[in-house]
């Protein structure tokens, strides 16, 4: 149950698109199409942004999109906005009703 | 409105015990699996434990297996986490989280978190 690997930080200018990864193993990310992404602003609870690799909950902007290839999932934020500045965590189902989170990526809007 | 409110956090000595509660409202509590997730200061999220809607099935991360016990009281719409043999590295904000739908694998509602500090 090792944490999934994410880049520590990613930055972009307003309006740009950024993509960052979440790398696991065949026992988690690669084994199931159950990757979710969470946005967390400082001092706040996480918010679900993407589930089942690429689906968005109602109310989440379509600027957020997810994908997966092999053992690596990715989150893309298009049309970057100041309010997108936050920490982002991926999470994968790891079998037997257990889960593993990623190490987290800090997104900075320049 | 779906709401989760944790309580029970505080300062505890190493080796001590603590019981967290998570009061749920705004949804049919017994229909949803629930989880506990923690976040150490300045660190990432860590899934700890989950429980089925009826409470008959429980699951744990290796890091807490044998020390933490998850349970629920569906008559009181409350989730619990009993934590024993606490260590300094258990210091964290503890969140309860609700599965988005029955038999889904993500969490669409989180509490505000409760801070546990393990220190002498």
Image (cartoon, coloured by chain):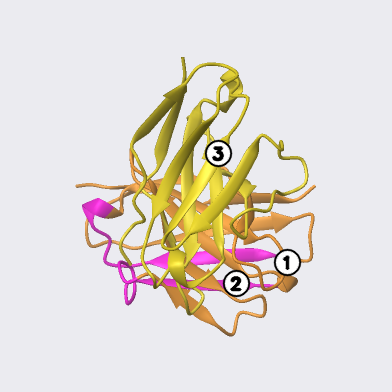
Task: Look at 62% across and 60% down and name the residue there.
Answer: A52
| In magenta stretch: residue B64 | yes
Task: Look at 32% across and 77% down and name the residue there.
Answer: B66
User: Disc 2 designates what residue?
Assistant: B72
User: Disc 1 designates what residue?
Assistant: B29
Above or below, A42 against B49 in this view is: above
In front: B96, or A64? A64
- For the residues beneath circles 1 and 2, the answer to whether they share a chain is yes
Task: Look at 59% across and 57% down and name the residue there.
Answer: A53
Q: Which secondary structure lies at badge 3? A: strand
Percent position of residue B104, x then y? 65, 68
Residue at the limit of the structure toward the bottom, as seen here:
B56
Task: Look at 64% across and 64% down and name the residue there.
Answer: B78
Percent position of residue B1, x then y? 80, 47
In front: A107, or B92? A107
Above or below, A105 against A58 in this view is: above
- Chain letter for the orange colouring in the rendering: B
- For the residues beneath circles 1 and 3, the answer to whether they share a chain is no
Residue at the limit of the structure toward the left, as seen here:
B120
Q: Which mark is residue A76?
A: 3
Q: Is residue A60 left or right of residue B65?
A: right
- Chain letter for the yellow colouring in the rendering: A
Q: Residues within 10 Å of mark 2 (few under 14, many from 20)?
A: many
């Amino acid at each position: 149950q090792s944490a999934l690997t994410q880049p520590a930080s990613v930055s972009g200018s307003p309006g740009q698109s950024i993509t960052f990864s979440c790398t696991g193993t065949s026992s988690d990310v690669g084994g199931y199409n159950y990757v979710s992404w969470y946005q967390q602003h400082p001092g706040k609870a996480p918010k679900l942004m993407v589930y089942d690799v690429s689906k968005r909950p109602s109310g989440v902007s379509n600027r957020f999109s997810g994908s997966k290839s092999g053992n690596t999932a990715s989150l893309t934020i298009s049309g970057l906005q100041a309010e997108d500045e936050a920490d982002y965590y991926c999470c994968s189902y790891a079998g037997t009703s257990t889960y593993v989170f990623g190490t987290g990526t800090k997104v900075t809007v320049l | 409105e779906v709401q989760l409110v944790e309580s029970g956090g505080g300062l505890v000595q190493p080796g001590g015990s603590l019981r967290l509660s998570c009061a749920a409202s705004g949804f049919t509590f017994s229909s949803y699996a629930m989880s506990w997730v923690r976040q150490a200061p300045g660190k990432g999220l860590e899934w700890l434990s989950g429980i089925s809607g009826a409470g008959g099935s429980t699951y744990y991360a290796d890091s807490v297996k044998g020390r933490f016990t998850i349970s629920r009281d569906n008559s009181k719409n409350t989730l619990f986490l009993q934590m024993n043999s606490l260590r300094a590295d258990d210091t964290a904000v503890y969140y309860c989280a609700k599965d988005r739908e029955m038999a889904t694998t993500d969490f669409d509602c989180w509490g505000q978190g409760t801070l546990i500090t393990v220190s002498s």
